[in-house]
Amino acid sequence: MKTQVCIIGGGPSGLMLSQLLHLKGIDTIVLERQSREYVLGRIRAGVLEHGFAELMREAQCGERMDREGEIHHGFHIAHGGRLDRIDLHKYSGGSSVVVYGQTELTRDLYEARDRMNGAVIHNAEDVQPHDLTGSRPHVTYRKGDEVVRIDCDFIIGADGFHGVSRKSIPRDVLREYEKVYPSGWLGLLSRTRPVWPELVYARHERGFALCSLRSQVLSRYYIQVPLSDSVEDWSDEAFWAELKRRLPAEVADKLETGPSIEKSIAPLRSFVAEPMRYGNLFLAGDAAHIVPPTGARGLNSAASDIYYLYHAMLRHYQDGDSTGLDQYSEKALARVWKAQRFSWWMTMLLHTFPDTIAYDRRLQDTELAYLFSSEAAQRSLAENYVGLPF
Ligand code: RFL
Ligand code: PHB
């Protein structure tokens, strides 16, 4: 087989790039290891920054998001029995975020690819990129007993943190920066009314908690748990009781509980791989960097990678100008590191870890007191949360 751009990974990053390039007449093939049902069964992001929503519209996939997604102009931080609000709209120059689940936007991207007869190959096993620095870049994969080869101009590694793409860059070229936090988030999805109209991030000495939502009938809650815990350790009843303990009374009293539809634990990790380009291989999204979910930056960092890559590919194919491709890694990493900084800051502000000492707690108290006494500090938080410009 032959294509211009072979994309490894059919998550939001890979599908979005495929769709954008297709609309400009550039041919792609997407190789996804899992089935579509599996990909759509993963419950992940819920908050999209303005720039991501714009990209969905440019990809002609924004219609349902604009109809069903909720625009949020602010969110809350619960701390020390108080519930303070960050006014995103006021402090970000009129911007906002869209509450729309990753599951739904992935479904929209798959539907768009189907509508345009896009090639998305599921259950592709043993995917392997080859000849990254040579003149014949290609990707092989196995389907049953058959090994298939795809020749291409470029290979995009959009295969998430555990993918094969990053691992195919030689060890002496790749630099990895990592910080692992000694906790995870246990998430629960339930068909209940959201407890609060906007998101509530809660700092509590028993651990962090987050009240989020997918719609007015679907809620998503998280509690910080030790890394040693597993989902089986937490009955729904135990989850609701612990969540309530970590919320201020005015919120806890309104909490509607119900059976879980999904429960899963996500570890908290910060990670960046540099460079994001090696020969004809370009990394994008979680394949190159991940953040703890506290600042809702993960998917949104992927969006800027895709934006830069899309425009660089257009210049290459339309004008024969490869400057954008040559600058991709440096440009993408500059924004990636800002999202890393913000996610780290919000994580350290709101979590109590086993190694958090009394001094750290007093600094957290002070940081929160400063935040809500300073318009400049709230502006800084707001501009990062709605997303720095691409
Ligand atoms: P994905 O979604 O991991 O997709 C990669 C795809 O590649 C496939 N794959 C392979 N395919 C072929 N061959 C191989 N060898 C392969 N290896 C892997 C995988 O099956 C998969 O389908 O990466 P992508 O597309 O870069 O998207 C990144 C986002 O998924 C991620 O950043 C966000 O979910 C992070 N995140 C959040 N981000 C936000 O911006 N806002 C949020 O509110 C938010 N909340 C979250 C989150 C992540 C969470 N978890 C579970 C880590 C909440 C949570 C709990
Ligand atoms: C979510 O709804 O899943 C969500 C929202 C905000 C975050 C992280 C996750 O910061």
Image: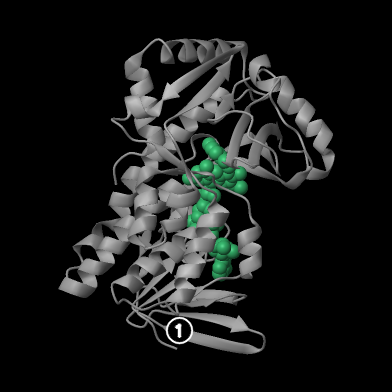
Beta carbon of the mark 1 residue lies under 8 A of ligand 1? no
- Using the image, determine if residue 193 lies above or below residue 372: below
Can the viewer see residue 165?
Answer: no
Q: What residue sits right under mark 1 in the picture?
A: 150
Q: Residue at x 60, y 76 (%)?
A: 126
Q: Is residue 105 left or right of residue 137?
A: right
Question: The N terminus is located in which quarter?
Answer: bottom left
Residue 188 at x, y percent in the picture: 70, 41
Give the x, y percent position of residue 284.
42, 58
Mark 1: give few (<14), some (14-19) or many (20+) Cα within 10 Å: some
Q: Pick whichever, 23 or 79, lies toward us.
A: 23
**58 horizontally vs 366: left or right:** left
Q: What residue is rendered at 33% in x and 70% in y?
A: 21
In which quadrant of the rendered view does residue 86 lie? top left
Image location (x, y in percent) of residue 213:
59, 39
Residue positioned 40% across, 69% down in the render: 18
Q: Between residues 242 and 168, which one lies in front from this camera angle?
A: 242
